[in-house]
Image (tube, helix red, strand yellow):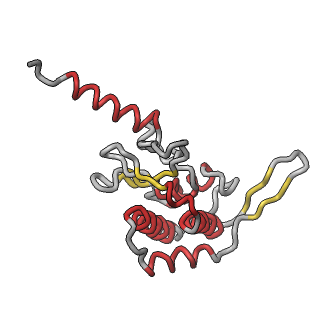
Amino acid sequence: MSTLTDPHLFVSGNLALNFIGTVGERRTTFLDRLTTADDLAEWVVAAGILDTAPDCAGALERAVRLREAGWRLMLATLEGTPTAEADRALANRHAHDTLPELTLRADGSVRRSGTIDSALAAIARSAIELLGSPERDRLKECGRDACTRLYIDTSRGGSRRWCDMTVCGNRAKSKAFRARNTEPAH
C-alpha cells in the first residue's frame, strides 16, 4: 500500500495531529481514510491507544466530528485566528470522558484497554494539551502542495518543511528537480 494512502502514517509528532492526518489532501481530493467503523477501530489499535479493536459501531460519525473540529482548531491556531466555540466545546466534551485503562504486567509490558469513547478522549486531550502549550508555536502544515498534514516541527532551527521527508520531502524535491531540468535552454 502506498504511504500516502496508508491510514497508519504516524509522522505528526502528536496523537491528535496523526488522527487529523487520516484525511489527506484536504483542499483538493479529500482522501478520507476513515470511512467505516472497522477503519476507525483499526486506526485506534495502530495508533497504540488500545491493544484490541474496540466496538466502533455508531462511533464513526462522532469520531469524524472530533477529527474535523480538531482540524479547524489547529488551522485557526496556525493562522492566528480565534478558535470556534463549538469546536472547543466538542473537544472539551470528549476530553472529559474516561481515558483508556493502563495496566503494567509482570513482564514490564503495558496493557491498554477501553472503549472507543476512551480512545476519543485520549485524542481530544492530546489536541487540548498541544493547543494549550508552547509547543503550539511549532505547529506547521506540510509544505508539499498536495499534502495538508499538520505536524510538530521538532527540528533544531524550526525549519522543517515537510510532514515526512521520505514521502513529501522526496516528492517535493523530485518535482523541483524535474522542473529545473525541463526548462528550455537559452
Indicate the position of residue 53 as horizontal and vertical percent values.
64, 56
Query: Which residue sits at x=28%, y=26%?
Result: 177
Q: Nearer the viewer, residue 162 or 38?
A: 162
Q: In this view, does 47 lie above or below 67?
A: above
Q: Is there any visible trace of residue 10 in the rendered image?
A: no
Q: Can residue 74 be seen in this view?
A: yes
Q: Which residue lies furthest to the top in this view?
A: 185
The image quarter in which residue 3 lies: top left
The x, y position of residue 166, in whole percent, is: 46, 33
Residue 97, percent across and down?
A: 65, 75
* The image quarter in which residue 119 lies: bottom right
Q: Is residue 145 left or right of residue 183?
A: right
Quadrant location, the N terminus:
top left
Left or right: where 61 falls relative to 124:
left
| x 40%, y 75%: residue | 82
* Total numbered circles: 0
Task: Name which residue lies at 43% across and 58% down.
Answer: 35
Residue 58 placed where, x, y %? 52, 70
| Nearest the eye: 128 or 53 | 128
Quadrant of the image containing the C terminus: top left
Q: As drawn, is 102 to the left or to the right of 8? A: right
